[in-house]
Amino acid sequence: MKKSNFIVMFLIALFLVAGAAIVQAADKMDLTGKWNLSVTTPSGPGAPVFTLKQDGNKLTGTYKGYFGEAPVTGTVKGNSFEMKYTMTGVTTVYKGKVDGKKMSGNIDFGGKGTGTFTGNKE
């Protein structure tokens, strides 16, 4: 009986540690780095680069693309994020999900159009 109790307790402890590691990894999703995106819009494709820094659930960084360069702000919650920049009075918003070194989602070009994006972290 004692041996079976030990095995049960060991398995419970193992599952608790594994579960905690998974939760901790999900909480540590970090978008910090350089992201090369591929954008699809009705007006044609694009290939912007976002250089991001994540501090907790806050994002800052830089957009560099066809329209020039602009500061980026945003938020992160779990594996979902939102980032935006404003150029010539138009605020563009990227909303998506990240999975390791890949991201994807939708774009709103300040109510003037929409698009989709995928991206890879360098």
Image (tube, helix red, strand yellow):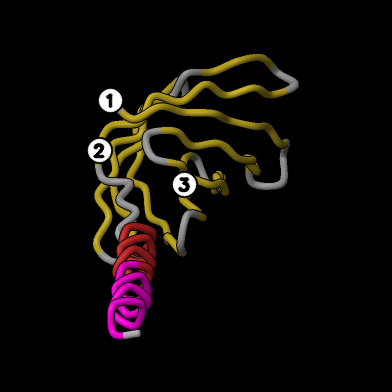
What's the residue at 56%, 46% (across, down)? 96
Magenta part, dominant SS: helix
What's the residue at 33%, 46% (across, down)? 31
Q: Residue 78 or 60: which is nearer the viewer?
A: 78
Observer-side mark, 1 or 3, equals: 1
Does residue 68 appear in this view?
Answer: no
Amino acid type at image mark 1: Glu
Residue 14's disc number: none
Q: Residues within 10 Å of mark 2 (few under 14, many from 20)?
A: some
Amino acid type at image mark 2: Gly
Do labels 1 and 3 touch, CB within 8 Å?
no
List the residue tagged with mark 2.
Answer: 33
Distance from Cα at disc 2 to Cα at disc 3: 21 Å
Q: Quick check: 94 above or below 16?
A: above
Amino acid type at image mark 3: Thr
Query: Is 39 one of the magenta-colored residues?
Result: no
Do labels 1 and 2 touch, CB within 8 Å?
yes
Q: Earlier in the sequence, mark 1 or mark 3?
A: 3
- Percent of width and height locating residue 122: 28, 25
- Tally of numbered tags: 3
List the residue tagged with mark 3.
Answer: 86
**What SS does tag 2 mark?**
strand
**What SS does tag 1 mark?**
loop
Q: Residue 50 or 19: which is nearer the viewer?
A: 19
- Percent of width and height locating residue 36: 39, 24
What's the residue at 61%, 15% (across, down)? 45
Q: Residues within 10 Å of mark 3 (few under 14, many from 20)?
A: some
List the residue tagged with mark 1.
Answer: 122
Q: Bounds of the magenta span?
A: 2-14
Q: Earlier in the sequence, mark 2 or mark 3?
A: 2
What's the residue at 35%, 85% (across, down)? 1
- Percent of width and height locating residue 65: 41, 24
